[in-house]
Image (tube, rainbow, N blue to C red):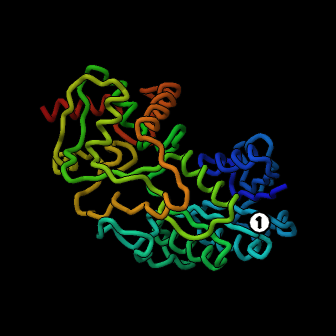
Amino acid sequence: MTRVLVLGGTGWLSGRIARRWVDDGASVTCLARGGRPAPAGTRLIVADRTAPDAYAAVAGEEWDEIVDISSDPAAVGAAVEALGERAAHWSYVSSLSAYADNADPDADESAALAVPLEPGDEYDYSRAKSAADRAVSALGDRAAIARPGLIVGPGDPTDRFGYWPSRFALAGAGPVLVPDAEGLAAQVIDVDDLADFVVAAARRGWTGTVNAIGPTMPLAAMLGVARAVAGHTGALRAASPEWLVGQGVAHWAGPRSLPLWLPADMPGFATRRGDAYRAAGGGIRPLEETVARVLADERERGLDRARASGLTRAEELDLLAALA
């Protein structure tokens, strides 16, 4: 029986990976902080990965597969040091944010990574993922590294992608505020496609590094798919970047934001090449399918619920009035 250790296993992505291994007949152990349940059929070991003895309960076992998605390079490095010799294969979910910049369109896996975060440095997500990447790469031909971009799908705790189908559905025949997205791109991967890839790649012993991401498309086209799936029939009111910033609307994510909208001075953002991912067997389902799944989840959770990212409908209507 395949023995799998998931470092995590109780979160949005890591939980999906653990469930897939259980469904595949593996013996799965999840090592996590606790506070959230591990998938049915797994063994949960509660441990603090910042503690010196974090891996004591599993360090004496042999593992066919270890999975990690952490963005804490100290935790990733400590895991590699404690468990690396006992792992036949190691999967790490890194990020496109590990790259040094977004200046070059159509960049592939050979692009320069950010300067790795070192102990004592102020935390920076890009440099942290780069440092974690480096730690796992030390395992050589036993390491599989996936660098996803924007991960989307049902249950997304960031609320970024889901904002748009939810808002279009909530507005119905009413107006929706959108950014003037001229020249802006979008690029996503469905969380279930990513989880499928991580498990399937490990099952066949694949190693290497890939940008796990779907095709690039204009941001306006992605919003158009979300609008069509949601059945929105109202007007789209586009606002300029300058006007939105002047009104205190934030880029990308967080409260009072227009999710997925970014400044125009990042020409390489959302244009990463994903050829190697697809060549390695990575799947990309149709965007319409992902949006439909997300919308069903948004309806279940409440279209007008409090969100981690986006505008409330009241904030949006105030902005629309000001724009008019």
Q: Secondary structure at mark 1?
A: loop
- Of residues 290 and 301, the one nearer the viewer is 290
The amino acid type of the residue labelled 1 equals Ala
Coordinates of residue 66 in the picture (x, y in percent): 72, 63
Residue 67 or 287: which is nearer the viewer?
287
Q: Which residue is mark 1?
A: 54
105, above or below 321, in the image: below
Q: Which residue is farthest right? A: 60
Relative depth, front residue between 1 and 123: 1
Judge left or right: residue 294 versus residue 139: left
Q: Quadrant of residue 131?
A: bottom right
Residue shown at 78% from the left, 76% from the top: 85
Specify whether 269 is left or right of 175: right
Name the residue: 79% across, 52% down: 28
Residue at 49% across, 46% down? 190
Q: Nearer the viewer, residue 205 or 67?
A: 205
Q: Residue 38: where, in percent of width, then height? A: 73, 45
Quarter of the image with the N terminus is bottom right
Q: Is residue 43 above or below residue 228?
A: below
Q: Give the number of callouts.
A: 1
Is 204 above or below relative to 87? above
Q: Is residue 123 left or right of residue 24?
A: left
Query: How far from the left and from the top, in percent, is residue 210?
Result: 51, 65
Residue depicted at x 22% and y 35%: 319
Q: Does 64 appear above or below 175? A: below
State left or right for residue 196 relative to residue 285: right
Question: Label 1 crowding class (10 Å Cα cut-off): few <14, some 14-19, many 20+?
Answer: many
In percent of width and height, residue 231 lies at 33, 24
* Image quarter hosting the C terminus: top left
Q: Quadrant of residue 235?
A: top left
